[in-house]
Image (spheres, grey):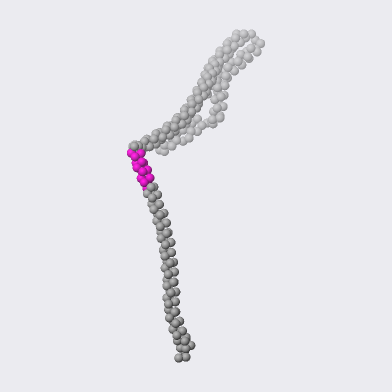
Amino acid sequence: MLKGRKTAGRGETVAAHYAFGPLEDDIIIKHRLLTRTTTTRGEPPLKKLQKKFTAFAVEVEKDADNHGDCERLAKAFLQELNTFEIPLLKSKAIIDANVREKENFNELKNEINRQILLAQDDIEDLKKQLEESKIERQHKEECEAIRKLIAMQPPRSATQKTITELEQEIASLESENTSGSRTLELRKKQFSLLLHVVDELQNTIEEEQRSLMEEMRTAIDEPRTAFEDATGGPEAMALD
């Protein structure tokens, strides 16, 4: 695995290049954990154990009198097996600790999620309380504004006195209006009667004028008739 390096004079980081991809790394790590191969130097522990067991099995299968060698190889194999078992027990203890840690982590995560939900509920409640407080404050401000307006107004006794004076004035004006209406109605009737009288007078004058004209016409016609009768009429005047 090659580490990332900086280009001189530019300050730019070149991307790191790896010999193996993430998937190959996981496979190699899993193989090393299973075979207890923790280093690339020397023989792997599992291979050493296999060699010890193979040497012991080969020695046991011999027909020769080799109890000492078999016992020695058996002890060597058991010792190697114990050596191989200790890291396994450590790994198992680590795995158990990791499992417990994971369970604790899950419990802690659940507790944190529960607290988050409770906090969210508290936040919603606080939001509602804030809105209610805003509305209540707005109502208080409106009440204060109304109180100031009321304080600016004159006292109730003065207002009542003004209202009484206005009612009296309105009653007086209504009385005057009624009186004026009656007077106007009377004037209308008088004016109507006057117009009727004028109309009758005009008719009378016209009748008198016509009578006078008839009398004058009659007065003019009578001397003319008498003169014509005396002179013999128009025919006699024509003969003369």
Residue 100 locus on image (x, y percent): 52, 19
In the rendered image, the vertical position of residue 39 relative to residue 230, given as above or below: above
Quadrant assignment, res 191 = bottom left
Q: Report whether residue 41 is seen.
A: no
Assign the magenta stretch its main secondary structure: helix
In the image, residue 27 lies at what x, y percent?
56, 27
User: Is residue 203 or residue 145 the one in the foreground?
Assistant: 203
Q: Work out whether residue 215 or residue 191 is closer to the camera in this orientation and state it.
A: 215
The residue depicted at 43 percent of the width and 37 percent of the height is: 12
Closest to the observer, 93 or 186: 186
Q: Residue 113: give x, y in percent of width and height.
A: 50, 26
Residue 113 in the magenta stretch? The answer is: no
Q: Is residue 154 left or right of residue 220?
A: left
User: Magenta segment, which residues?
Assistant: 158-173
Which residue occupies the extreme bottom position in the image? 240
Query: Which residue is depicted at the point 42% across and 71% down?
Result: 209
* Of 223 and 159, the residue lying toward us: 223
The residue positioned 55% from the left and 13% from the top of the image is 82
**Is 47 drawn above or below residue 220 in the view shown?**
above
x%, y% of residue 46? 57, 19
Residue 62 vs residue 161: left or right? right
Q: Is residue 182 visible?
A: yes
Image position of 53 (left or right of 199): right
